[in-house]
């Protein structure tokens, strides 16, 4: 990222640093983010597919602009609020990648009427009928993608259920618009190593490519063939037949991704800045003002080989201490201690000293905060404040 | 609560109902809330102590006004943002009940200069020195409470460490203001039955009453003697020597509190309204748009006798289904299923039908939302929208 792209926020005093920010707050290392984006972009360029970034992790137009191919998109979102917010900032090519509820179609039609190519996702005939009905009501053809269940993880038409796939496709083609097929290898977040990830990626590809073939064989259109998850996007060897890849958490990365080998701890761009507010020396505890309200309740590493508690503790420069984690958290208190079983020593931190906590799950931790405080690697100067939004 | 106190929000169409709200969203049953408030208030009246409600659960002036004794307070908060927001709405008597970081004292002095009696909390000599120094700098005596660790749960001076208690007390009395002593029986959230809770409550009382006696014996002032947690507030038999009780989550209650017997499931006033968006019939799953972003990642019942997953499922009227829980959740997807081991049957719910999810932890779930949609028990009409805030 060029220095020029980090425009300081208007209200930000030029002297704001990691020492003077109010804590707890969210810190974003722009150099790490930039490397993460470049890495996946280069990889997908080599595979010849385009990236449709998932903006649900970032929920920030400043971040979105840095990893979308163009200001208009393409992009993926998880809520209509995201679709509306990003549309207001000029994004025009959006997939809302959560199964559509019929009551949400009025908002979809409204955004489409404003010139946003917003596409919905579904996996039942009932939903396809609702989209066809809403299309008739709005005097437009609302485009929909059919979700395919590549791994039994959550939603989607089960591969092999040809009758259901064709009935949904025909319903859409007749009364709305069949835009394509989409899948998400949710099970890939459980890890399993490079070979397992390559299998997850190939299962993702096969699930949608076969569904697309079936639809096209029935003379139904299927222009878009969409796969995506951060782990599979970093492991796919061949994406023949796929037109786009969706991924989101890679922009920041987190401890769950590090735990399954998709990134290194040193790649994690997001942290929560916290201040030491107490000690329980007999117990080996350091108390900070970074509780679960700022870290989130996500314990995504609890089932991984290395349990990171509520987060891995770094010094103010962003360098992780050896085996120092947030062992427990209350709403506005975090308890730092040596990881159980480790021989590491607790760092010497006084009341008022600051640490940066690396998150288990970037999507969950970022969601607890209204703004990103943007720094560069190794610097304490806050160069920009990027607002983020929540809600539905 | 009188009907008159539920003023409809200006922008709210009179026809808004649980059927027409955008989902997911937060629903508050005002009748249940009202009962919860009355129950604890009656209890504390009988014990002859005043309630200093903790506003960290609600983070809403509309809710706060319903459970504070007066518009001016007293009140307890967990962040300076809460102190500032409630002060702006007229609250004047506030304890900020998280150990003070020296860098936050400028904001404390600013609020005090505006006429808010904001009191800080601490448990180290270093913090007491910082408060004394800030008092000198601001030309005012900033009042502080000394936190006592009644159960080894988190923070506070260990009972029996008289030297530390007296040194903190003397430092405050000399250079700031020693307002009193405070403790919180955090371990009471683990449950253990009525007798265990009565012991937790008595341990809370003894910890602060003995600390107050020690301070007073050394001719130090100690006007306020403060205890509090929702479980102990509902079990204390005797509060001799205590001047006030702090509690917060009781206003809404939640599954964690029901799981340790402090309330019934039918008392839980908060729920997340969600819409059915899919089925995986072979797996016995119903998919909704209520994922962890709306429910929070809190799994507080996971170590209780009955694990409620990400929440217990109710029908749209707020009546819990037998053994139907959110067995798993992604960011914007919730998976409803029969509780493992139960013979209950999945309710027949179609695409578009709505359910209400009772939360594990009201503080965490409410924090995911910008507004409360207020209804009465058994009614679908939304009678008010109460905004809430977050941040620090």
Image (cartoon, coloured by chain):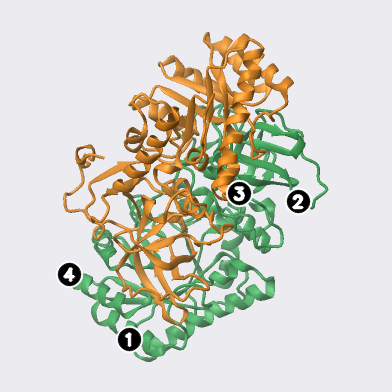
Chain colours: A orange, B green
At x 38%, y 41%, the residue is A39
In front: mark 2 or mark 3? 2
Q: Is residue B3 left or right of residue B131?
A: right
Residue of label 2 = B340
CA distance separating discs 3 and 4: 45 Å
Dot 3 or dot 1: first in sequence order is 1
CA distance separating discs 2 and 3: 26 Å
Q: Are marks 3 and 1 on the same chain?
A: yes
CA distance separating discs 4 and 1: 21 Å
Q: Residue B349 or B387: which is nearer the viewer?
A: B349
Q: Tag 1's secondary structure?
A: helix
At x 53%, y 73%, the residue is A341
Q: Are marks 3 and 1 in contact (CB under 8 Å)?
A: no
Residue B78, position as x, y percentages in the image: 41, 60
Dot 3 or dot 4: first in sequence order is 4
For disc 4, the chain is B
* Residue B269: mark: 3
Q: Are marks 2 and 1 on the same chain?
A: yes
Q: Residue B340 or A325: which is nearer the viewer?
A: A325
Dot 2 or dot 3: first in sequence order is 3
């Amino acid at each position: 990222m060029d220095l020029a792209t980090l425009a300081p926020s208007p209200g930000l005093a030029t002297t704001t640093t990691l020492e003077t920010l109010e804590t707890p707050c969210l810190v974003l290392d722009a150099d790490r983010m930039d490397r993460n984006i470049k890495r996946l972009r280069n990889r997908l360029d080599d595979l010849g597919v385009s990236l449709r970034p998932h903006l649900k992790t970032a929920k920030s137009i400043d971040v979105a602009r840095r990893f979308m191919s163009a200001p208009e998109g393409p992009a993926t979102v998880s809520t209509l609020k995201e679709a509306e917010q990003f549309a207001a900032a000029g994004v025009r090519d959006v997939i809302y990648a959560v199964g559509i509820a019929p009551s949400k179609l009025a908002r979809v039609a409204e955004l489409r009427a404003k010139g946003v190519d917003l596409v919905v996702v579904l996996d039942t005939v009932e939903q396809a009928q609702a989209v066809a009905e809403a299309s008739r009501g709005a005097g437009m053809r609302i485009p929909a993608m059919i979700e395919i269940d590549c791994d039994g993880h959550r939603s989607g038409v089960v591969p092999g259920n040809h009758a259901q796939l064709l009935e949904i496709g025909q319903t859409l083609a007749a009364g709305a618009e069949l835009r394509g097929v989409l899948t998400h290898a949710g099970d890939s977040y459980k890890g399993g190593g490079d070979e397992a990830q390559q299998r997850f990626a190939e299962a993702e590809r096969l699930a949608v490519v076969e569904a697309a073939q079936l639809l096209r064989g029935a003379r139904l259109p299927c222009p878009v063939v969409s796969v995506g998850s951060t782990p599979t996007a970093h492991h796919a060897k061949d994406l023949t037949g796929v037109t786009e890849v969706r991924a989101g958490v890679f922009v920041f990365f987190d401890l769950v991704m590090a735990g399954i080998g998709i990134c290194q701890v040193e790649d994690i761009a997001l942290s929560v800045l916290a201040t030491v507010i107490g000690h329980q020396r007999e117990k080996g505890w350091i108390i900070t003002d970074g509780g679960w309200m700022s870290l989130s309740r996500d314990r995504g590493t609890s089932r991984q080989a290395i349990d990171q508690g509520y987060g891995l503790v770094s010094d103010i420069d962003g360098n992780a201490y050896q085996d120092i984690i947030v062992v427990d958290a209350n709403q506005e208190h975090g308890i730092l201690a040596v990881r159980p079983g480790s021989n590491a020593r607790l760092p010497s931190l006084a009341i008022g000293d600051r640490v940066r906590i690396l998150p288990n799950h970037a999507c969950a931790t970022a969601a607890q905060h209204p703004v990103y405080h943007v720094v560069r690697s190794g610097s304490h100067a806050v160069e920009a404040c990027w607002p983020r939004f929540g809600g539905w």
